[in-house]
Image: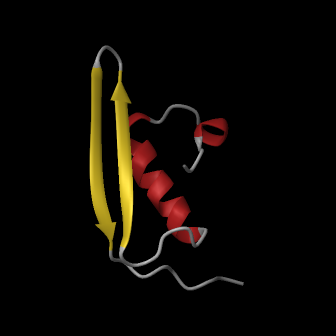
Amino acid sequence: MVPTFHRTGNMGAATLPLQLSLAAEQGRLRPDDTVALFGLASGASASVMLMNWSVPPPAPTR
């Protein structure tokens, strides 16, 4: 879980890309990791997607 709501509020559809980016920057994603994405919307809408992370983590910055 990568919490972002406390910093950005509700960003709707932009939340998942932001969380993936932050997880990659923090070194929490490695090639061949399985990532589960969960989406909820108002009413009774929900979605789940599993993906295989194949992008190498970014180089650390100083």
- Structure colour scheme: secondary structure
> Which residue occupies 47% across, 36% down?
11
Q: Residue furthest right?
A: 62
Rendering coords of residue 41 (x, y %)? 34, 25
At 61% from the left and 68% from the top, the residue drawn is 26
Count the numbered circles shown. Answer: 0
Name the foreground residue: 36 vs 39.
36
Of the 4 image quadrants, the one containing the C terminus is bottom right
Q: Position of residue 42 (x, y in %)?
A: 35, 18
Residue at figure coordinates x 49%, y 53% from the top left: 19
* Residue placed most toward the observer, 40 or 62: 40
> Left or right of 7: which side holds 39?
left
Q: Quadrant of residue 9?
A: top right
Question: Residue 47: x and y, percent?
Answer: 27, 36
Query: Relative to residue 37, is residue 5 drawn left or right?
Result: right
> Residue shown at 45%/58% (left/top)?
20
